[in-house]
Image (cartoon, grey):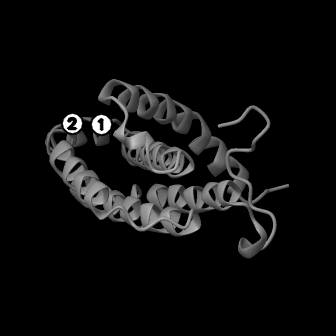
C-alpha cells in the first residue's frame, strides 16, 4: 500500500475510478463480508464462507484490472484454504469450549477473533492478487518466500485495519 493511499477509498462511481481504487473498494467490501461470516460461530462454516468470499473477490479484482480470471490460481487458493483450514478448524473446535466457557466474555471473544482473522485473511489475499494484477500478472510467479512474506505482511496489516474499519463503520451513538 502506498504511503499516501487510504487502505479503503470509497468515493466516486466505480466506472470513473482507476483500477487500484476500485480494487481497494472491492477488497473492503469483501473484508466486511468476511467479518460478517466470522459471526457464525463455527470454524468449518467460517473457512468455507471466507474461501467463497475470496474466490468472488479475486474474480472481481481480475475484472477491475481487465484480466481473465486466473482459474488455476483460484483453484489452488481454494484447495490451500480448505486443506489448510482443516487443522485450525479442528483446533478451533477443541478450543471453542474452553474459550466460550469464560463467563460473560468467552463467546464474544471467540466470535470476534474468528471475524477479525477472517477479515484480515481476505484483506491479505486481496492485496496479494491486487499486486499480482498490477504487476501485469507476474507477481504470483515470484519465489514462494516472497509471496509468503508479502502475505504475512498484509495479514498483519489487515489485523490492524479490520478493527479500524469496524469502528469507522459502526453508527455513532452521540
Q: Position of residue 135 (x, y in %)?
A: 53, 45
Neighbor class of circle 2 (other Cα within 10 Å; few <14, some 14-19, many 20+) is few
Q: Is residue 118 left or right of residue 61?
A: left
Residue 148, quarter of the rendered image: top left
Tell me, for residue 95, which label it has, or none.
2
The kind of secondary structure element at disc 1 is helix
Q: Are marks 2 and 1 in contact (CB under 8 Å)?
A: yes
Q: Is residue 115 left or right of residue 25?
A: left
Tell me, for residue 63, which label it has, or none.
none
Residue at left 58%, top 62%? 26
Which of the pair 20/174 is nearer the observer?
20
Q: Quadrant of the C terminus?
A: bottom right
Q: Quadrant of the N terminus?
A: top right
Which of the pair 24/155 is nearer the observer?
24
Q: Is residue 110 left or right of residue 94?
A: right
Q: Work out whether residue 109 can be spotted.
A: no
Residue at left 25%, top 56%? 78
Amino acid at each position: 500500500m502506498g504511503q499516501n493511499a487510504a487502505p479503503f477509498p470509497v468515493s466516486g462511481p466505480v466506472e470513473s475510478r482507476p483500477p487500484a481504487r476500485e480494487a481497494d473498494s472491492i477488497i473492503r467490501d469483501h473484508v466486511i463480508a468476511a467479518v460478517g461470516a466470522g459471526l457464525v460461530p463455527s470454524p468449518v462454516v467460517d473457512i468455507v464462507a471466507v474461501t467463497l468470499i475470496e474466490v468472488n473477490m479475486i474474480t472481481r479484482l481480475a475484472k477491475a484490472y481487465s484480466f481473465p480470471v486466473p482459474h488455476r490460481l483460484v483453484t489452488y487458493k481454494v484447495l490451500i484454504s480448505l486443506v489448510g483450514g482443516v487443522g485450525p478448524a479442528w483446533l478451533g473446535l477443541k478450543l471453542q469450549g474452553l474459550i466460550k466457557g469464560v463467563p460473560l466474555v468467552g463467546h464474544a471473544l471467540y466470535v470476534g477473533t474468528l471475524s477479525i482473522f477472517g477479515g484480515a485473511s481476505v484483506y491479505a489475499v486481496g492485496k496479494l492478487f491486487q499486486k499480482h494484477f498490477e504487476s501485469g500478472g507476474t507477481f504470483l510467479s515470484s519465489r514462494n518466500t516472497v509471496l509468503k512474506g508479502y502475505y504475512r505482511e498484509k495479514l498483519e496489516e489487515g489485523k490492524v485495519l479490520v478493527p479500524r474499519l469496524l469502528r469507522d463503520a459502526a453508527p455513532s451513538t452521540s
